[in-house]
Image (tube, rainbow, N blue to C red):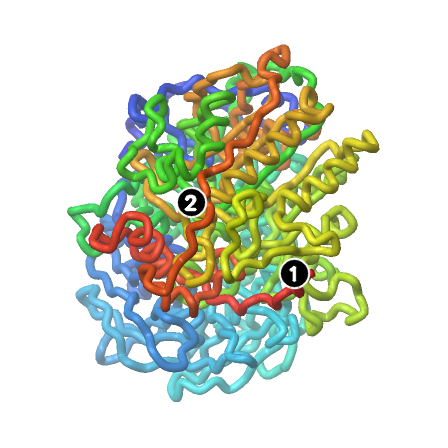
């Protein structure tokens, strides 16, 4: 990959102080983005990440598995150990003189029994203990296995499992406590472990476990703020072995714990989502990386007061979020602090005597941890998503026979070994990072192109589930598709094909997310918090983690209780943004769930029960008659028009007895038309293209995708035949592209922009992504961008000055043979599908869902596609049929 020698060598540009909210908005309000060539013709220099940002990773790269999340230097400084939280998990040992791989130990075996997960694994915490006859002890968090593994590191750099564990019994109802950060006492006799899984089983509070390392017994639990993550223990001075610090991801603070006490002695408010802790050598300073605030807090451990806060994002105190500090390391002389910035793909350099940011170093995609070599000459940086800008997954990789080409598996994490830059080199590095993130003032000045709304007043935002471009539109000859990978061609999706042909075909469009967990956050926030990114990669691997990503944390609707949502992105949600700027909106299905009576709400509350919003801003603005995610309920009227119900179908819902989501939405839309008071913005979730596999008695995958396609057609038809048509734009996205193959990139997906102001037959070859859609929608309703990623996303240069494409659209009804297709008891793995939970998105183990879909559509003898793992989620309460 590119090293420092390939970076542009031009004069240093100081960090821009003018990038305040107003400055970012003004600078990029009309940026339409570079007119990029089709993907297959692009060189790597012009190819951005799917997030729209670029990487020019410095140094040499060493592959270390999926989503490396933490690193620890051995006490003698000869080795660096890396741990993972993704699909393929290893403890990898690197040599500190050169960053080369010395050894690697895998943690990917299937588990049986009462460990709480289907697969063994790691999570985040690493701590070296004393040296023994067998080697130096290493303690490694085992995440939802609820234990800490004990290993030894030999003098030759080989790791060995001892077979011993520090066992941490799960919470009530078998919900894992989830061991995250770990730290040892001075003599190594005690280990402190943060339990990162807060919920009803912990009284909505956090817990820190104390273990005897000799016996492996848990001797104490100390109460802490919610979702504790990183741990730092004082091992010298008057408070040695008496004081422990733990960060709280949820409650934006660092708790000071006194060993022997039952709860925190004090809480120190930091920035949002503090996740990284680092003590200096004297242990009189504690550095805290605040992922949600783009800052580092510096704590005086003698007084337990925050003495300084350093902002790490470009642009000053009022700049938009988008840096995401994660890991910390000190230079050998402790005059510089290095901080990984996940969403800027950079390392920030802080001058500690001056207390200010002095520059950036470009690294790989989504860095999570940083370490400094013992001689102070090299940096080691863990890049969770590696250094490849494109990750196609059309077939299995013949060079890696044991690796299946699922999106979370195909992305290879690396560790960069980088010479510590001189001040002059840092200037060049800084300029490159600002350019990679489109934050150079000169670049922004060049992009200062006004966006002119041609007359659009109403935006409809439709979100669907999990499809790649090739999977749906791969058969369109005019697009960059691979028909061999097309599972749902024109007969199944006639409306999406027709809409792409009449309005705009986008074949260079990407989801910013990997799976639904981060997908729903990118699609509603323009970015995903570090909590969401880390745990989506972890929870989709067969290692138990609940689905915390659509307004509930461990099943609790925290926002309705006035408790912070640990998964909330720094930018907040689109509906909050619209509300703040007085843009009216109506919600149909976004962040709707079954809210149970034991979640802390008054049982008489109208929010208790099924189909209720999980966010305060959506209360009173959501249609309770529009059913939440449920694949047994139709998206469209196709089954009614063809008289083709399935035996297991929910035929009506809501007090008006709607036979489909389209019918429920259309009832309110007709009222808006009648009264002339249509909201400026509408959210619509039509999820049935997710499918229910081959569960007997349910519509087949082809039928559900065709039903979803007809719903899209019916919605477009209704709007196009209304008086609002010539003032409207419809945007349709998939939340992610995880359930399929694509020959360009595993993130590439379908996207549609439908409006009278989109010229007929537009072939939009320019790069676009989730944030491009958000940026364009926000521009149309005249609200500023939510964060730096949205602000710098290329706005869709797709609208004409006049409504030249204004003819009404007539929805195309798929053939009855497809709509009426029902899974029989002899369908491929029909019996297995009966036991799977299709009531909640991505609750089905992915390796099973993918096997079922592929063979049901491609044939039993077609080679199996990728192996995947899903989330283990308690089924939501059923709603009553009306």
Q: Residue furthest front?
A: 643
What residue is pinned by disc 1? 251
Q: In the rendering, at what x and y percent does residue 146 appear?
A: 44, 75
In the rendered structure, are the residues bearing label 2 and label 1 in contact, judged by CB atoms less than 8 Å apart?
no
Residue under the point 63% across and 26% down: 729
Q: Is residue 308 visible?
A: no
Crowding around mark 2 (Cα neighbors within 10 Å: few <14, some 14 to 19, many 20+) is many
**Gap in Å between the C-alphas at discs 2 and 1?**
50 Å
Horizontal side, residue 275 vs residue 700: left or right: right
Residue under the point 29% across and 33% down: 482
Q: Quadrant of residue 47?
A: top left
- Residue 420 is labelled as none
Residue under the point 51% across and 79% down: 174
Q: Residue furthest right?
A: 675
Examine the rendered structure and indicate whether residue 239 appears above or below residue 710. below
Q: Quadrant of the N terminus?
A: top left
Nearest to N terminus: mark 2 or mark 1: 1
| Mark 2 vs mark 1: in front | 2
Examine the rendered structure and indicate whether residue 665 appears above or below residue 591. above
Q: In the rendering, at what x and y percent does residue 247 appear?
A: 57, 62
Looking at the image, which is closer to me, 323 or 300? 323
Horizontal side, residue 171 vs residue 822: left or right: right
Disc 2, SS: helix
Horizontal side, residue 579 vs residue 164: left or right: right
What residue is pinned by disc 2? 818
Examine the rendered structure and indicate whether residue 152 appears above or below residue 440. below
Disc 1, SS: loop
Q: In the rendering, at what x and y percent does residue 631 appear?
A: 52, 55
Residue under the point 59% across and 48% down: 569
Q: In the rendering, at what x and y percent does residue 127 appear?
A: 39, 68
Crowding around mark 1 (Cα neighbors within 10 Å: few <14, some 14 to 19, many 20+) is many
Q: Is residue 544 visible?
A: yes
């Amino acid at each position: 990959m590119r090293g420092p020698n390939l970076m542009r060598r031009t004069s240093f540009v100081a960090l821009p102080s003018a990038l305040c909210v107003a400055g970012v908005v003004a600078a990029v309000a009309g940026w339409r983005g570079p007119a990029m060539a089709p993907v297959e013709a692009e060189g790597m220099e012009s190819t951005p990440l799917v997030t729209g940002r670029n990487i020019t990773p410095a140094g040499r790269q060493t592959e270390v598995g999926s989503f490396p999340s933490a690193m620890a230097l051995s006490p003698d400084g000869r080795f660096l150990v890396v741990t993972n939280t993704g699909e393929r998990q290893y403890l990898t040992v690197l040599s500190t003189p050169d960053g080369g791989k010395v050894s690697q130990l895998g943690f990917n075996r299937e588990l049986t029994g009462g460990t709480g997960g289907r697969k063994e694994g790691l999570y985040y915490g690493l701590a070296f203990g004393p040296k023994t006859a067998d080697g130096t002890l290493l303690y490694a968090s085992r995440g939802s296995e609820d234990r800490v593994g004990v290993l030894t590191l030999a003098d030759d750099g080989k790791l060995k499992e001892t077979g011993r564990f520090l066992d941490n019994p799960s919470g009530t109802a078998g919900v894992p406590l989830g061991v995250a950060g770990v730290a040892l006492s001075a003599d190594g006799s005690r280990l402190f472990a943060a339990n990162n899984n807060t919920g009803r089983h912990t009284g909505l509070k956090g817990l820190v476990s104390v273990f005897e390392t000799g016996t492996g017994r848990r001797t104490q639990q100390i109460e802490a703020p919610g979702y504790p993550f990183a741990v730092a223990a004082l091992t010298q001075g008057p408070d040695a072995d008496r004081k422990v610090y733990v960060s709280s991801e949820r409650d934006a603070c660092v708790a000071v714990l006194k060993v022997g006490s039952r709860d925190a002695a004090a809480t120190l408010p930091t920035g949002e989502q503090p996740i990284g802790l680092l003590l200096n050598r004297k242990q009189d300073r504690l550095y805290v990386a605040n992922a949600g605030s783009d800052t580092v807090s510096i704590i005086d451990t003698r007084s337990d007061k925050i003495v300084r806060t350093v902002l790490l994002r470009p642009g000053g105190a009022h700049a938009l979020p988008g840096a995401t500090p994660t890991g910390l390391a000190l230079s050998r002389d402790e005059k510089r602090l290095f901080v990984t910035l996940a969403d800027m793909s950079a390392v920030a350099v802080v001058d500690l005597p001056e207390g200010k940011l002095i520059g950036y170093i470009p690294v790989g995609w989504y860095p999570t941890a940083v370490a400094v070599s013992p001689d102070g000459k090299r940096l080691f940086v863990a890049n969770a998503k590696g250094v490849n800008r494109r990750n196609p997954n059309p077939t299995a990789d013949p060079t890696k026979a044991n690796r299946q080409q699922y999106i979370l598996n195909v992305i290879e994490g690396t560790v960069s070994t980088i010479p510590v830059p001189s001040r002059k080199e840092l200037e060049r590095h800084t300029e490159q990072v600002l350019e990679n993130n489109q934050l150079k003032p000169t670049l922004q000045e060049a992009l200062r192109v006004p966006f002119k709304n041609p007359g659009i007043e109403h935006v409809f935002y439709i979100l669907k589930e999990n499809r790649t471009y090739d999977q749906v539109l791969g058969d369109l000859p005019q697009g960059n598709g691979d028909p061999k990978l097309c599972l749902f061609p024109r007969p199944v999706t006639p409306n999406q094909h027709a809409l792409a042909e009449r309005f705009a075909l986008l074949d260079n469009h990407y989801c910013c997310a990997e799976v639904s967990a981060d997908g729903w956050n990118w699609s509603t926030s323009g970015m995903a918090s570090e909590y969401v990114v880390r745990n989506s990669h972890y929870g989709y691997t067969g290692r138990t983690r609940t689905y915390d990503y659509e307004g509930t944390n461990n099943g609790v609707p925290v926002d309705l209780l006035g408790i912070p949502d640990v998964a909330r992105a720094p930018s907040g949600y689109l509906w909050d943004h619209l509300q703040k700027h007085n843009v009216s909106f109506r919600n149909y299905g976004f962040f709707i769930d079954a809210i149970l009576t034991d979640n802390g709400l008054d049982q008489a509350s109208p929010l208790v029960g099924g189909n209720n919003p999980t966010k305060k801003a959506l209360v009173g603005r959501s249609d309770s008659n529009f059913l939440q995610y449920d694949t047994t309920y139709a998206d469209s009227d196709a089954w009614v028009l063809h008289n083709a119900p399935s035996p297991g179908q929910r035929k009506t819902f809501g007090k008006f007895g709607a036979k489909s989501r389209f019918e429920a939405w259309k009832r309110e839309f007709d009222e808006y038309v009648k009264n002339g008071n249509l909201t400026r913005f509408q959210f619509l979730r039509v999820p049935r293209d997710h499918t229910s596999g081959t569960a007997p008695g349910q519509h087949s995958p082809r039928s559900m995708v065709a039903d979803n396609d007809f719903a899209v057609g019916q919605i477009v038809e209704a709007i196009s035949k209304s008086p609002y048509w010539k003032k409207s734009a419809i945007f349709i996205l998939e939340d992610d592209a995880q359930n399929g193959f694509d020959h360009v990139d595993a993130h590439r997906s379908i996207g549609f922009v439908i409006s009278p102001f989109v010229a007929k037959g537009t072939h939009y070859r320019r790069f676009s992504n989730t944030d491009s859609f958000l940026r364009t929608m926000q521009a149309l309703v005249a609200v500023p961008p939510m964060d730096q990623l949205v602000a710098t996303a290329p706005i869709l240069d797709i609208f004409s000055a006049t409504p030249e494409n204004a003819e009404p659209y007539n929805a195309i009804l798929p053939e009855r043979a497809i709509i009426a297709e029902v899974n029989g008891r002899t369908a491929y793995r029909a019996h297995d599908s009966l036991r799977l939970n299709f009531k909640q998105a991505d609750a089905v183990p992915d390796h099973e869902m993918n096997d079922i879909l592929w063979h049901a559509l491609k044939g039993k003898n077609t080679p199996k596609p990728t192996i995947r793992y899903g989330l283990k989620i308690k089924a939501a309460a059923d709603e009553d049929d009306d």
